[in-house]
Image (cartoon, rainbow, N blue to C red):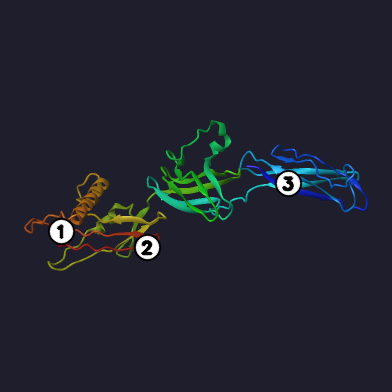
Amino acid sequence: EKYSQSLTFRNISAVSRSVRVLQPRNSEFSITPLRFPANCNGSIIAPGMSVSTTLKFCPQSLGDYSDIIRVETESGSCTVTIIAQREPPQLSIPTVLDIGACFVGDANRVVFKCTNTGGGGKFNLLTERDRENPAETKPRDPSVENCIRLAPFTIYPTDFTLYRNDSVDINIEFVPLSLGAFEQKFFIQCDNGQVRNFFIKGVGREIVISVVELNSVDMNTADPILFNDLFFNSIDIGNETSQHVQVVNDSGLPVEYEWVWLETNEKDLHKAGQRKILQRQQSDEEFLNGEMKTKDLDADDDFTKTSLMKSIDDSESFSNCVKES
């Protein structure tokens, strides 16, 4: 597409002047021959008279262009600056995208809403390698692969169009496989040639949960002798007793947990606990689906199982009382 703009130069001095206008240096810009007044003598402009030309612009891309036009007379020269550009986009997302903390082996997905309050444009996401070696980068088909992977992060979508006040959700998934802080850099490139760089940050953490008090007494879980206090004293039939345990989560993240009953002779307590939770979940699904079988009331049941599930923060404690049936 071609654009044109009329330019007029007027002689504001007290004497006649000859004038010459030089072509812009960039091929995208050009000026037509000067148009002098009908009664003008050659290229001489009388005081108060003017000469005009038409500036033409034929861009080869959607980028920004600038140049100058030089005007020469006997008394010296001056320049006219030419700027041809679209209104640049203004994206609302911050330069640093902080995903926060996530447990190692777990996954966390954060959505950043990106709103364009400036001019419209098409955008695509680039890795640092794409930016440094564009010739070696294979073009992506957004319909097939509309994400980029910067371990341990995944970002999508990678190609989108935003007009003024349009928004898009930038999704970032964080899957840490080791402890520590992670940081990656990526770029958002607009079809006008502008490029902005962004950083993603995240922290991989491990679960740190410990029993700190037993019956309001500080407890060192590293001392196996203290675990004898977990045994209940003998009581009369029909009475009940309890012990209060305070558990603290030092992970810095909420932790979902569940109490499960385990036999003391289990070889692998972790696997046995996971198996109990899985059995409970399957039983709940059967109940919700209307498939729970009637329990045999004559069957032996050594005790009533009670489970508790909640999320706890760093300073929160809780106690749980288990009643014998």
* Residue highlighted by disc 1: 303
Mark 2 or mark 3: name the one nearer the start of the chain.
3
Residue found at x 62% / y 40%: 61
Q: Position of residue 270 (x, y in %)?
A: 27, 47
Residue 201 visible in rendering: yes
- Binning the other alpha carbons within 10 Å of mark 2 as few (below 14), some (14 to 19) or many (20 upward) gives few
- Give the label, 2 or 3, closer to the camera: 3
Mark 1 or mark 3: name the one nearer the start of the chain.
3
Q: Amino acid at mark 1?
A: Phe
Identify the residue at the far left of this view.
298
Q: Label 3 near label 2: C-beta < 8 Å?
A: no
Circle on res. 82: 3
- Binning the other alpha carbons within 10 Å of mark 3 as few (below 14), some (14 to 19) or many (20 upward) gives few
Q: Which quadrant of the rendered structure holds the N terminus?
A: top right
- Binning the other alpha carbons within 10 Å of mark 1 as few (below 14), some (14 to 19) or many (20 upward) gives few
Tag count in the figure? Answer: 3
Q: Amino acid at mark 3?
A: Ile
Q: Position of residue 198 (x, y in %)?
A: 55, 47
Residue found at x 72% / y 48%: 5
Q: Position of residue 134 (x, y in %)?
A: 56, 34
